[in-house]
Amino acid sequence: MSRTDLPRPKPGVMDIAAYVPGRETAHGVAKVYKLSSNESPLGPSPAVTEAFAARNVDLATYPDGSAHELRQAISRAHGLNPGNILCGNGSDELLGLLCQTYLAPGDEGLFTQHGFLVYKIQILAAGATPVSVPDTDLTANVDAILDAVTRKTRMVFLANPNNPTGTYLPVSEVRRLHAGLPKDVILVLDAAYAEYVRRNDYEAGIELVSANSNVVMTRTFSKIHGLAGLRIGWMYAHEAIIDACNRVRGPFNVNALAIIAGAAAIGDRAHVERAVEHNEAWLGRVCDALEALGLTVTPSVGNFVLIHFPKTAGRTAAEADEFLTARGYILRRVAGYGLPDALRMTIGSEEANLGVIDALKDFMA
Ligand code: PMP
């Protein structure tokens, strides 16, 4: 059968470069340290295990399609109206849902040059046109984004902080971005790493959403809450956006265990605080140690750090990746983000962090 006889995906789909997840394993090493997907070295709150033990989940019945219990718990934790919250199978699902709901062929979706790759994928999957906007110093540039807006622009994605750069925009810049956008353009603030940020001039986006009908904030349980395996995300938006997305989403998009786990996790503030403290302590130590080896790191406010390697043979990012993998340390190649000379390292356990530093000492020697 020739290729032309095969069913043809709709326009845009074959332009998608499929998302490549962080590698999980390395062969021939005693122990593997996965530092490739920004997961939490602390894992989930003990309250999650307790909630599973206390609840007799009937796996034969469908979950509550409105994820009521989880939305209530999120609204309690953040002081939000549950009617403005929609939960998803990871925030990835919600990013796609927004595109499916608001983007049609001919529309443009904007994202930043080194922004999270899922935006482009989902814009293309919706049949719309992806527009990449240049960064300045690996940081989103508000003027460049506003310059790129056309009459066709329907949605602007901003990861704040951004993955994989770890850079962020202060709330004044996010407000300036919003103020410059037409009222019918949705600004999606992807705040997957919000809890880690310790900067007085940062806000995840709650106030902007509360005051405006064209801003959406997305959040995840995959990072600080240590629940990546269960796939739980949520978004906060005007009820008109929630209503439209509710029409498009799968009726049972969040599973029964995710609802229970998420509700338990978000109530355990002490666990979140422990994860933040661990990150604060190790982010600084890791960056200092890497710089002492002569490597450059981009200042990060997240739970990961972008490490830049020289182009010199024997010292490149690709070679460092091979070297580290052979010792069981799995970092993330970020060539797909336009960063061929860098590796992204998740801040891991003490053992993992010290192991990477030691290995890179040998690599750079
Ligand atoms: N946004 C950003 C910026 C991310 O880095 C990630 C995780 N890689 C996600 C969204 C998706 O997270 P999840 O689907 O696990 O909620």
Image (cartoon, helix red, strand yellow):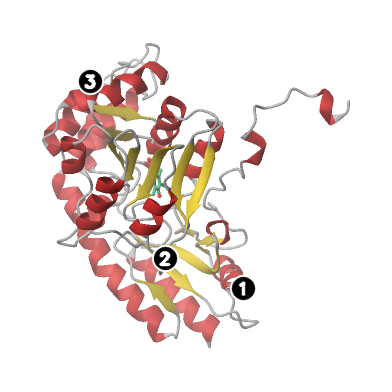
Furthest residue to the front?
151
**Residue at the spot 57% in from the left edge and 65% down from the top edge:** 325
Q: Quadrant of residue 287?
A: bottom left
Q: Which numbered marker is on residue 319?
A: 1
Q: Position of residue 176 (x, y in %)?
A: 24, 53
Estimate the spatial distance between the alpha carbons at disc 3 and disc 2, rounded to whole Å. Answer: 39 Å
Q: Which numbered marker is on residue 68?
A: 3
Which numbered disc, 1 or 3, marks the residue that appears first in the sequence?
3
Q: Is residue 181 visible?
A: yes
Q: Is mark 1 within 8 Å of ligand 1?
A: no
Q: Is residue 112 above or below residue 318?
A: above
Mark 3 secondary-structure assignment: helix
The residue beneath circle 2 is 138
Which of pointers 2 and 1 indicates the residue nearer the eye? 2
Estimate the spatial distance between the alpha carbons at disc 2 and disc 1, rounded to whole Å. Answer: 23 Å
Q: Residues within 10 Å of mark 3 (few under 14, many from 20)?
A: some
Which of pointers 3 and 2 indicates the residue nearer the eye? 2
Give, as a three-letter code, the residue at label 1.
Glu
